[in-house]
Structures are given as structure tokens and as C-alpha cells.
């Protein structure tokens, strides 16, 4: 389906990004994976496995998505190697939870830079190649928090709402050029990041891990089930397919009913 195309998925060494990378490579796309990896051996293992499993070219770049210079250096490398990025998935993201009047300024800056501004930079750097080819797909992994808010997540909610604004604006700019721009808004997904919080939360609240999943994490999610990484990955692949050529500027919830409240 994506043979001959190159996909860049930011923050793809773990969680949702890795699931998306896996599905796109499974459909034939060459890949650029990215993430903050402390262990180059592990990263190389992952890169080599993805290439071998799917028979595609895979490059890794460790650009810090909070740094404009790193993003520009990554694009210089990958454009030289692959010519263009046909599919761009802006997925890298971080979280910090604190009341707004106690929110550390450096955390605010980092969340805005990684969760929002990085998508501006990758988009502006990928678009010239997409315009030249008259085809491109940009998928922004936002969040249910792009549509509704929760307390104590001001930076994350502001960044994800901003990402939906960027999605719509860019979609309108490139609508006549074969390029679509959409956002996916997942509810809770059981990624390594979320999994790690469960035992600590159970201990802190004196409740079982099952109660943490049901009554804390999934309190707002009517299905009381986590969204699967594979579900987000399949929706991303659909948005990149020919069948979704007329879908652009959308924000698609995949949240077990959360935003129906
Ligand atoms: P994760 O922590 O499992 O993975 C995050 C990835 O981003 C990793 O590969 C990490 O190395 C990378 N990363 C972090 N900071 C980076 C930086 N500065 N530069 C480059 N890479 C960086 O997280 P996840 O749960 O898979 O989340 C992925 C995206 O999905 C995020 O944008 C998140 O906001 C969004 N999301 C997650 C959930 C959820 O419940 N897990 C729900 C809605 C939206």
C-alpha cells in the first residue's frame, strides 16, 4: 500500500509511535524512526528488527523534538537519504501534571515545544517535498485532551488544543495539492508510560492495580477499556490511504466514548 513512500514518525521508539511505525512499515513504507534513546545498542536493535521484519529501509534519528536545530538536522539527513517525507506522523509528546499556579515554567516550555511547536517545524520542513510530488499525509497524534480539558494538565491541554488548530490551518493551506492533514485524539492508551504509573498509584492510594485502571485512569472512559495501540496505528494507516483522500482538517476521537460526555 505504501511501497516507495517514506514515513517519519516522531517519538517512535516506544508506545503509540512504535505501533504506528510498525503498521506503516508492514504496509511497505520506508521508515524514519525517532526518539530519545539512552541506549544506542537497543535503538540499533529496534531499527534492524523493523527493517528485517518488514523488508523496508529504516533509519533512526535521535533528534530532540524540543530543539529546532535538532529537527532541522534530522530533516537535512533524511531528505538527503530518502529524497522526501511522504507521510509525517507527529507523535512525540510528554506530560506534566501540576496546578497551574505551581506549574514549573520549564515544564510548560518543554511541553509546548515537544507537543506543539515540533509539529510546526516538521510540517514546514516536510511540505516542500510533498508539494513537489502532489501527495502527502500528515497525521498529528493529539489527544482527547485536544477536545476537552482535565484539571492540572494546563500545558498538555493547551498544546493539544493548539495542535488541532495547526491541523486545521495547514489542511486548508494544502487542500488543493493532494496533501491531507488530520489529527487523532486518543483516550487512555496502555503504553509503557501509563503502565509504569499503575503500581505507584495503587500504592499511593492504597487500592488494587485493577482499581487504579478502572476508577482512576479509566474514570472518564465509558468503555472502561484502554484504547489499543493497534487501534490508533490502524486509524493512522487508514488516514494515509487513498480511501481517506477526502478527509482533511479533521480531529478524530478514538477514546471509548470519553468526549461523548
Ligand atoms: P511514550 O512515552 O510511550 O512514547 C513517547 C515517545 O516519544 C518515545 O519514543 C520517546 O522517546 C519519545 N520522546 C519523548 N520526548 C521526546 C523528545 N523530546 N524528542 C524526541 N522524542 C521524544 O508515550 P505514548 O503514550 O506512546 O504517547 C505518544 C503520543 O500519544 C504523545 O503525543 C501523547 O501525548 C499521545 N497520547 C497518548 C495517550 C496515552 O494514553 N498513552 C493518550 C492520548 C494521546
Image (cartoon, rainbow, N blue to C red):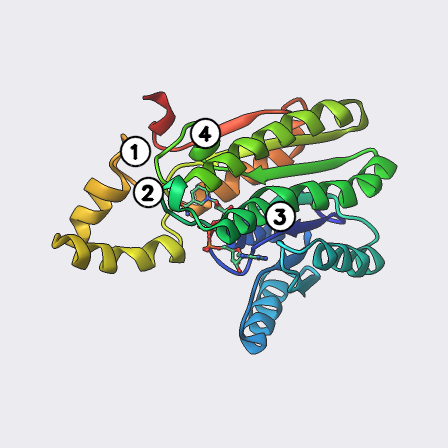
Q: Earlier in the sequence, mark 3 or mark 1?
A: 3
Left or right side of 33 for 211 = left
Report which residue position mark 3 lands on: 27
Which is more N-terminal, label 2 or label 4? 2
The foreground one among 216 and 132 is: 216
Disc nearest the viewer among 3 and 1: 1
Q: Earlier in the sequence, mark 3 or mark 2?
A: 3
Secondary-structure class at tag 4: strand
**Numbered label attached to residue 253:** 4
- What separation in Å lies between label 2 and label 1 (alpha carbons)? 8 Å
Q: Out of 164 and 88, give the one closest to the viewer.
A: 164
Q: Is mark 1 within 8 Å of ligand 1?
A: no
Near-viewer residue (244 or 161): 161
Which image quadrant is residue 36 in? bottom right
Mark 2, ligand 1, within 8 Å: the answer is: yes
Q: CA distance from mark 3 to mark 1?
A: 31 Å
Residue 261 on image: x %, y %: 32, 21
Left/right of residue 257 with respect to residue 95 in the rendered view: left
- Residue at the image position 27 percent from the left and 30 percent from the top: 222
Disc on the earlier residue, 2 or 1: 1
Mark 3 lies on a secondary structure that is loop
Mark 2 vs mark 1, foreground winner is 1
- 13 over 246 or under it: above or below: below
Identify whether 245 is placed above or below 28: above
Report if the CB atoms under discs 2 and 1 are less than 8 Å apart. yes
**Residue, disc 2:** 226
Residue that carries the numbered disc 1 in the rendered image: 221
Numbered disc 2: secondary structure:
loop
Mark 1 residue element: loop
Find the distance from the CA under tag 4 to the CA under tag 1: 12 Å
Separation of marks 4 and 3 at Cα, in angstroms: 24 Å
Amino acid at each position: 500500500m505504501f511501497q516507495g513512500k517514506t514515513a517519519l514518525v516522531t517519538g517512535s521508539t516506544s508506545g503509540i509511535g512504535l505501533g504506528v511505525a510498525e503498521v506503516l512499515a508492514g504496509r511497505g513504507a520506508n521508515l524514519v524512526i525517532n526518539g530519545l534513546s539512552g541506549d544506542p545498542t537497543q535503538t540499533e536493535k529496534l531499527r534492524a528488527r523493523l527493517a528485517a521484519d518488514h523488508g523496508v529501509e529504516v533509519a533512526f534519528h535521535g533528534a530532540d523534538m524540543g530543539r529546532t536545530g535538532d529537527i532541522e538536522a534530522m530533516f537535512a539527513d533524511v531528505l538527503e537519504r530518502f529524497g522526501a517525507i511522504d507521510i509525517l506522523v507527529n507523535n512525540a509528546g510528554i506530560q506534566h501534571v501540576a496546578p497551574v499556579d505551581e506549574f514549573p515554567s520549564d515544564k510548560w516550555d518543554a511541553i509546548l515545544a515537544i507537543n506543539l511547536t515540533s509539529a510546526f517545524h516538521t510540517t514546514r520542513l516536510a511540505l516542500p517535498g510533498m508539494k513537489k510530488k502532489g501527495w502527502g499525509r500528515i497525521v498529528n497524534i493529539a489527544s482527547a485532551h485536544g477536545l476537552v480539558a482535565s484539571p492540572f494538565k494546563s500545558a498538555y491541554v493547551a498544546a493539544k488544543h493548539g495542535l488541532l488548530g495547526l491541523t486545521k490551518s495547514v489542511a486548508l493551506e494544502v487542500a488543493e495539492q493532494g496533501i491531507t492533514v488530520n489529527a487523532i485524539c486518543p483516550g487512555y492508551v496502555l503504553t509503557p508510560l501509563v503502565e509504569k504509573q499503575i503500581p505507584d498509584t495503587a500504592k499511593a492510594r492504597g487500592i488494587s492495580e485493577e482499581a487504579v485502571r478502572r476508577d482512576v485512569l479509566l474514570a472518564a472512559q465509558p468503555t472502561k477499556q484502554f484504547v489499543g495501540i493497534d487501534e490508533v496505528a490502524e486509524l493512522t494507516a487508514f488516514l494515509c490511504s487513498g480511501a481517506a483522500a477526502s478527509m482533511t482538517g479533521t480531529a478524530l476521537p478514538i477514546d471509548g466514548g470519553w468526549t461523548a460526555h
